[in-house]
Image (tube, helix red, strand yellow):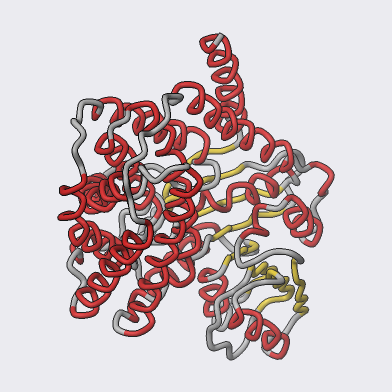
Amino acid sequence: MRICLTVALLSLLLLAGLYSNLSEFRQSGTFATDPPSPYVHYTPQGRELGQILVVHGLDSSKEMMNLLSLGLSDAGFNVYAMDLPGHGDSKVGFNAILAGQAINAALDSLGPNTIVIGHSLSGALLLDLAADRSFGTMVLLSPAPTPVDGIRASRVLVLTGRFDLPRIRSFVPRLKDAGAGSIELQTVPWSGHAGYILQPGTIRKIVAWLGGDASRLNTSRRIFFSLLGIVSAMLIAVLWFQGSSIASEPVNPRKTILLYISACTLALLICGAGVVWTGLRLFATDYLVSFVLLMGIALTPWTIRKCTRKFSQIPVGLFAAACVIAFAVFIGSELVHLTVNGGRLWRFAAIALAVLPLSFADEVLLRTIRPWWKAAGIAALTRILMASFMVTGVLTTNRNDAFLVLIVHFIVLLWMALWLIGELLRRRTQDPLATAVFTALIQAWIFAAVFVLT
């Protein structure tokens, strides 16, 4: 029965992945500019309505703009979605000046009358360019605040989320006074800083504003197949990671939480004096990984003292991590850059080693709390505490890493997702180290693939 269900789910997974990845009108390339900028080119479907350059925001990639780019292509636009320096497939380190130069060089390569769409940081960079360069049409998605002397554009659409960042919500209305042409401001309800980019309604709104036929969009179908692939992969994991209950061991939750608070305090103080893992050169991630490493080291004496189990299932943990990463790349690469190669490979290994001590401590000190929901609740509490201490650190002594404040909620969600997946593997293997290796490898892969090279 399990084999039949697995075959059926794998078929659905392959169907979803093939629908998402096999596109005859999408090709990768690199602008031969200084700096070189990787891009994906989406050829127009039907009569061509114009050419568009789509640029993502900070700590994102061209993959994040994939649904929007595909929707614009459906409507008949010739679309180029590029990676900024340090992001996605770019092999050049990031800085804001270089990013502005990359966008300008790409526009020179594409030629005049190119429509531009920029999110967050790129919205601000396009505003900077619009002070000296004339644009016909601009679409700015939650543009980051930047000094604006004037906007040389005929038409500008500015979208923000209803729950966008306060500084962006206060900045955007001032753009009305800076433009020589028509500037239209719209707010997307029930959305924050980036989520609306993935909403079919927002994509239809942008397409219609640009003069395209919104009825030709296949965005909802693409989202359905992406969700189908994710659900299928999750059900396969549930089928094959099933195991017996985790044996309960005597744990004092209150003392354990105090132990984690002490480890957070130590990590905060040491990182305040100096970030220990600076060699990664991943934007804001050096601080994050250093904090996690120091916490794991601080908890190691208690971890060793309580761990009495033999470790015999590490190959299972390695295999499970490889499967999850492969599924994630196959399905998730439509929305997030998840490829690790070149200079990111050694960073993946370094991050895995750095986060392993804390992952192992979690398995020994928290996972054996029963019932499982109590362990999950305490794990969530410790993740929130870690996030709070990190935010305190970057707002006080490590201001160069303040970008973490904007993404810390995503990091907490990632930690909890890994905790829940780890519960399945721990039940299957009954091995804390195998489960720790599994969660550390997945976390390291995501960090190495997503965060920005500097």
The image quarter containing residue 291 is bottom left
In the rendered image, the vertical position of residue 100 relative to residue 349, given as above or below: below
**Residue 34 in view:** no
Taking 439 as reference, is 1 left or right? right
Q: Position of residue 352 (x, y in %)?
A: 25, 47
Q: Is residue 310 left or right of residue 419?
A: left
Give the quarter of the figure containing the C terminus: bottom left
Q: Quadrant of residue 379?
A: bottom left
Is 149 or 371 nearer to us in this picture? 371
Whether 99 is drawn above or below 366: the answer is below
**Residue 120, picture quadrant:** bottom right
**Can I make out residue 173 in this image?**
yes
Measuring from the top left, give residue 36's x and y in whole percent. Answer: 36, 56
Q: Which residue sits at x=36%, y=73%?
A: 389
Compare residues 302 and 61 and report the one nearer the observer. Answer: 302
For image coordinates 37% across by 70% down, the residue present is 98
Task: Tell me which residue sits at (27%, 69%) in the image.
Answer: 262
Q: Residue, x 54% and y 60% (percent of image)?
A: 55
- Residue 109: x percent and y percent? 49, 58
Q: Nearer the viewer, residue 88 or 448?
A: 448
Q: Quadrant of the N terminus?
A: top right
Q: Position of residue 339 (x, y in %)?
A: 38, 42
Tell me if residue 68 comes above or below residue 331 in the rendering. below
Left or right, residue 319 beside residue 293: right
Q: Is residue 15 left or right of residue 3?
A: right
